[in-house]
Image (cartoon, rainbow, N blue to C red):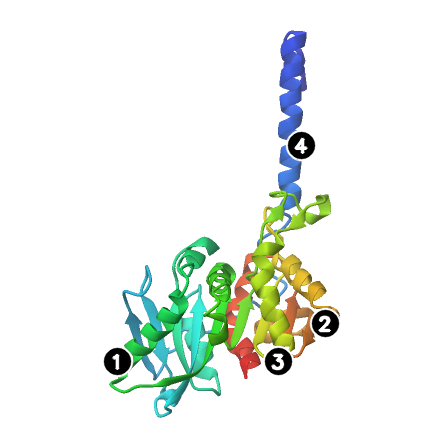
Amino acid sequence: MLRILFSYSAIYSTKFFCLFLVIYILNIQAQTQCPSPMVDHSRAHERVKIDKVSGKRFEIEGLLSEPIEAYLPEHSFETDSLRLLIHFHGAAYVPINAVEKSRKTYFLASINLGSGSSVYEEAFLKEGSFTRFINSIKDSLTIILGEEKNFSGVYLSAFSAGYGAVRAILNQPDALPLVDGVILLDGLHTDYVPEKQVLADGGNLNTEKLSSFLNLARLAIEGKKVFLITHSEIFPGTYASTTETADYLIQETGLFRKSVLKWGVLGMQQVSEASKGKFTVLGFAGNSAPDHIDQFHALFKFLNYLD
């Protein structure tokens, strides 16, 4: 290619050579930003099964852009007080499996709105929207069951892009008091500042988008909320990884990340943890797509942290 470039006149050869260098450098940068092989065969990557369930399963329409998949386990039928678990993003059978196995009496509202965190965030941007949402969920459950149930606690879990809804909810002054606990499954991201400039190249995190989570972490350390973060080692490259955002929260709360090496649920390999009060961060090995999905399918295990 260089021979072809230098066969032109000096002026054009200089222009084309510079263009070639720019393209080459950008290509190298793009490659270094995405080192993940996106496949893995060293871990088991077990998956929960789509089992038949004995509880009551139904859809709630009209509250969001997509129907809400709701589920009440059979062992929750007789109680007058339920824990409401609102899960964002991922096939509904996974959180259904989680509440089915739980020792607690949950009512599940599973929400899938599409791809990207923005679709989840936009659904709860309006002030007061979460409070109205909770009331509507309760009214729908009353209609389905023919009797009124009370919510003894409200808990949020989110996988991957679903964290966008959690961020929007936590930013609502009237919503935070309603939320008793949050689980983020390999899903807490923010931008780099300047845009797409990674930390290794002198970039910084856009911490404004992490402020509501930092506030929640501090409340959890004080024992006022429950906050669990799990993350893989995936490095997106163009925006902050879940490891980097977890590191920020750990640093700002004065915690220390301890190295561990032990088997987790479904064949996952835990490599680090940090915890104080009711705030916990669990780090797991892996930078592939299956490692990402592992965290979602392990919800039934992580749900125990809300106890």
Q: Nearer the viewer, mark 3 or mark 4?
A: 3
Q: Residue at x 31, y 65 (%)?
A: 63
Alpha carbons under labels 3 and 1: distance apart: 35 Å
Amino acid under disc 3: Gly
Residue 144's disc is 1
Which numbered disc, 4 or 1, marks the residue closer to the eye? 1
Residue type at mark 1 is Ile
Quarter of the rendering containing residue 109:
bottom left
Q: On the rendered image, what quadrant is the N terminus found in?
A: top right
Q: Is residue 119 left or right of residue 238?
A: left
The residue that disc 3 covers is 223
In primary-sequence order, the first of circles 4 and 1 is 4
Q: Which residue is mark 4?
A: 25
Which marked residue is nearer to the observer: mark 2 or mark 4?
4
- Spatial separation of the CA atoms under disc 2 and disc 4: 38 Å
The one of 99 and 150 positioned closer to us in this rendering: 150
Q: Are marks 2 and 4 in contact (CB under 8 Å)?
A: no
Q: Amino acid at mark 4?
A: Ile
Q: Residue 298, can we see it? A: no
Using a 10 Å C-alpha cutoff, classify the residue at mark 3 as few (fewer than 14 neighbours), some (14 to 19) or many (20 or more): some
What is the quadrant of residue 19 in the picture? top right
| Disc 2 residue type (three-letter) | Leu
How many other residues sit within 10 Å of disc 4, few (<14), some (14-19) or many (≥20)?
few
Residues at marks 3 and 4, CA–CA distance in whole angstroms: 49 Å
Q: Residues within 10 Å of mark 2 (few under 14, many from 20)?
A: few
Residue 153 bears which disc, if any? Answer: none
Q: Residue 140 at what x, y percent from top left?
A: 29, 76
Q: Position of residue 271 (x, y in %)?
A: 70, 68
Q: Which residue is mark 2?
A: 261
For numbered disc 3, what is the local secondary structure?
loop
